[in-house]
Image: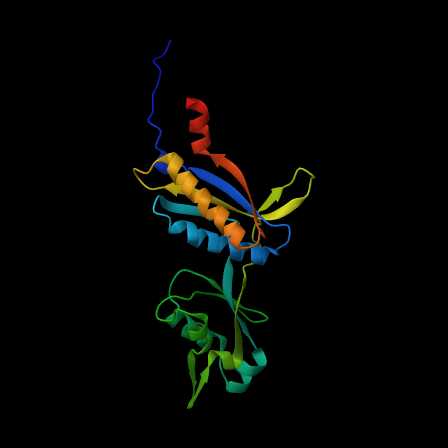
């Protein structure tokens, strides 16, 4: 026989409550906006340390270049790439594309917004243009994203977002989950029940069932 191994269970490393947010009346975009607002509301609860959220559609910045306008102003692709890279030198966040070329871009320092990228000055000879003069700078959903759905008993699938709630150190598990549930219930009522929630895991319930 082998000696039993006993390990401490750290509830700070597990969500006290994990649930899925769905809607039968809202588009995916509206569902994601509501889920993000709920996330912001939950993050203000004193017994909640952090949240995980999955199922949100990620956006990327796309620079769609007009070859005709580039030729008209006399700008070469490598010049455009150099100018964009100089002001967006960080982790990739999108692409710069022509009919034949695609370059990675990002928005960070010193440009921190899509408006700033559109206003990027480009000097060609004695003329100064903005990037928006020769290209469309757009924020679009990134391609080839995996989407989250929740299966219904009827066999259908609803667009979904999952949220995991982690308590603060020292907070009571039951109280932390109940506080999150209260905030979520109030948020649903404020939004005229346009979203529904389904519990996936509940550590508070598991503990309550085990010791009662």
> Which residue corresponds to the image point at 49% horizontal and 51% vertical from the top-left?
187
> Which residue corresponds to the image point at 63% horizontal and 47% vertical from the top-left?
158
When the figure is inspected, residue 1 is found, relative to residue 206, above or below; the finding is: above
Instruction: Spot the residue most to the bottom.
Output: 126
Does residue 153 appear left or right of residue 106 in this picture? right
| Quarter residue 47 falls in | top left
When the figure is inspected, residue 8 is found, relative to residue 27, above or below; the finding is: above
Q: Is residue 142 among the parts visible in the rendering?
A: yes
Q: 203 and 191: which one is in front? A: 191
| Residue 157 rendering spot, x and y as whole percentages | 65, 45
Q: Is residue 56 among the parts visible in the rendering?
A: no
Instruction: Spot the residue most to the left.
Output: 170
> Which residue corresponds to the image point at 50% horizontal and 46% vertical from the top-left?
185
* Badge count: 0
Q: 153 and 125: which one is in front? A: 153
When the figure is inspected, residue 92 is found, relative to residue 120, above or below; the finding is: above
Q: Locate the C terminus and report the quarter of the image it occupies.
A: top left
| Residue 182 rendering spot, x and y as whole percentages | 45, 44
> Which residue corresponds to the image point at 55% horizontal and 86% vertical from the top-left?
72
| Residue 198 rendering spot, x and y as whole percentages | 55, 41
Does residue 81 appear left or right of residue 99 in this picture? left
When the figure is inspected, residue 74 is found, relative to residue 8, above or below; the finding is: below
| Residue 1 rendering spot, x and y as whole percentages | 38, 8
Q: Which color mode does the image show?
A: rainbow
């Amino acid at each position: 026989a082998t000696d039993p191994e006993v390990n401490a269970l750290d509830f700070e490393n597990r969500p006290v409550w994990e649930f899925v947010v769905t809607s039968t009346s809202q588009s995916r975009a509206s569902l994601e906006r509501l889920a993000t607002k709920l996330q912001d509301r939950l993050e203000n609860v004193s017994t909640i340390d952090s949240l995980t959220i999955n199922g949100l559609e990620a956006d990327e910045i796309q620079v769609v270049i007009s070859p005709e306008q580039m030729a008209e102003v006399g700008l070469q692709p490598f010049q455009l790439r150099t100018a964009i890279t100089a002001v967006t030198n960080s982790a990739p966040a999108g692409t710069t594309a022509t009919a034949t070329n695609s370059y990675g871009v990002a928005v960070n320092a010193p440009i921190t917004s899509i408006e700033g990228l559109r206003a990027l000055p480009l000097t060609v000879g004695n003329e100064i243009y903005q990037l928006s003069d020769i290209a469309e700078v757009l924020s679009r959903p990134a391609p080839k994203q995996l989407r989250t759905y929740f299966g219904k008993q009827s066999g259908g699938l609803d667009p979904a977002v999952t949220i995991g709630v982690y308590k603060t150190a020292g907070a009571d598990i039951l109280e932390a989950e109940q506080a999150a549930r209260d905030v979520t219930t109030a948020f649903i009522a404020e939004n005229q029940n346009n979203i529904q929630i389904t519990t996936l895991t509940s550590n508070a319930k598991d503990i309550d069932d085990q010791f009662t």
